[in-house]
Amino acid sequence: MVAIVVISGLGLLGFAAVITGLAEPLIDSVREIAAGIEWPQWLATTPSDTTPPAISNVEVLDIALTSAIITWETDEPAASQVMICDPNGIFTWTETDPTLATSHSVRLSDLKPNTAYHYTVISLDAAENEGTGEGDFTTSAQADTTPPVISGVAVSDAGESSATISWATDELATSQVEYGTTDAYGSTTPLGEELVTSHSVTLAGLEPDTTYHFIVKSKDAAGNEVTSEAPQTFATLSALPADLEEGTKVGMRAPDFTLQTIDGESITLSDFRGKVVILNFWASNRQCSREMPYIQQVYDKWPREELAILAINHKEMEKDVQKFIDEKQLTLPVLLDPTGEVADDKYHISLKPTTFFIDAQGIIREKREMPFNSLQQIESVLESL
């Protein structure tokens, strides 16, 4: 009863003091009196707050090159702060916003473009209990304003009515060619929308024996476009006379065929129109064994866009062909003719080796039914074509 009376009395004194303007001295006196009271154990007291704020709905908004905004909510009023960590492990903290709120928003600045950050949001309630939440975000990349760089523009497989244009870019980009019989062009290939660095576009429907002008164009993912600097030209092949006879004599059109390489690739002779072709028929005999290294040297030395070499094995088992290839360390294309369909029926081969030199129009220009004895012998024929 004494404690209750004292409390009541102190309460009345406090009320009276407020009325009379004597609040501060009386409050100090009340505090001194209260500090000296021994309170009974049965008297209930308010427990201290030890529960941290619960954080939810964390979002990263307005991500830009060097800034972002992080928002979140808490289940009780609390302060706001964010810690971020960059890929190098460097931590930085924003200034604490001491305003106790349940909806929080902190703006991050001075970030690096195209950089991944880990963040921790921090909220302290009035009792200084700390709640946290974590996540990751990546700032925007700097705008790409640099067009691709074009290099290695080349023409290959120029035939009577088609040609292939190839080039490279230093970044992923589209593929397109403008072309025509003058430097005003007039024709454009469909846009190759696949983003690549190695580009190849085939022009079709061309006129035989005609010079064409062309430029190549590429556009990167950001829309930056580049055009090859100087127009280039190529010429299609003359059309073969309709009455040109097919056969195996010099001056005749070489018979077309399709065979499989020992690696399983399908090869067709007419696909090499626009290039000189060495067509060599061979078997695993002494003469071919002596000659083949010189043919391999030509294959290693001469540009692929100018010369094709097809070495056709005649009627031998695949395992024996592979053994020969391994012994001679051949990398040139070796074709298999297991039934003699090409060697016997189309080219009427009686001696091995037999070699045909076929020009870019598919016409036989030289035939040799004995082995070559040097690289120079083969090159002298090529240089005469």
Image (spheres, rainbow, N blue to C red):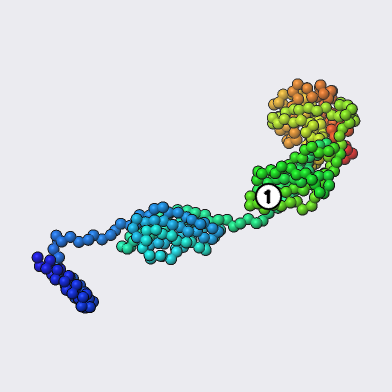
Front in this rendered view, residue 99 or 94: 99
Q: Residue at x 50, y 59 (%)?
A: 68
Front in this rendered view, residue 220 or 260: 220
Q: Is residue 146 left or right of residue 56?
A: right
Q: Residue at x 76, y 30 (%)?
A: 268
* Residue 86 in view (yes/no): no
The quadrant the N terminus occupies is bottom left
Q: Is residue 104 left or right of residue 382?
A: left
Q: Could you tell me residue 125's position as x and y percent?
A: 34, 61
The residue indicated by pointer 1 is: 219
Q: Could you tell me residue 194's position as x and y percent?
A: 65, 43
Q: Is residue 312 above or below residue 214?
A: above
Q: Residues within 10 Å of mark 1 (few under 14, many from 20)?
A: many
Image quarter of residue 38: bottom left
Looking at this rendering, what residue extends furthest in the left direction?
A: 1
The quadrant the C terminus occupies is top right
Q: Is residue 365 above or below residue 93?
A: above
Q: Is residue 177 left or right of residue 373?
A: left
Q: Amino acid at mark 1?
A: Lys
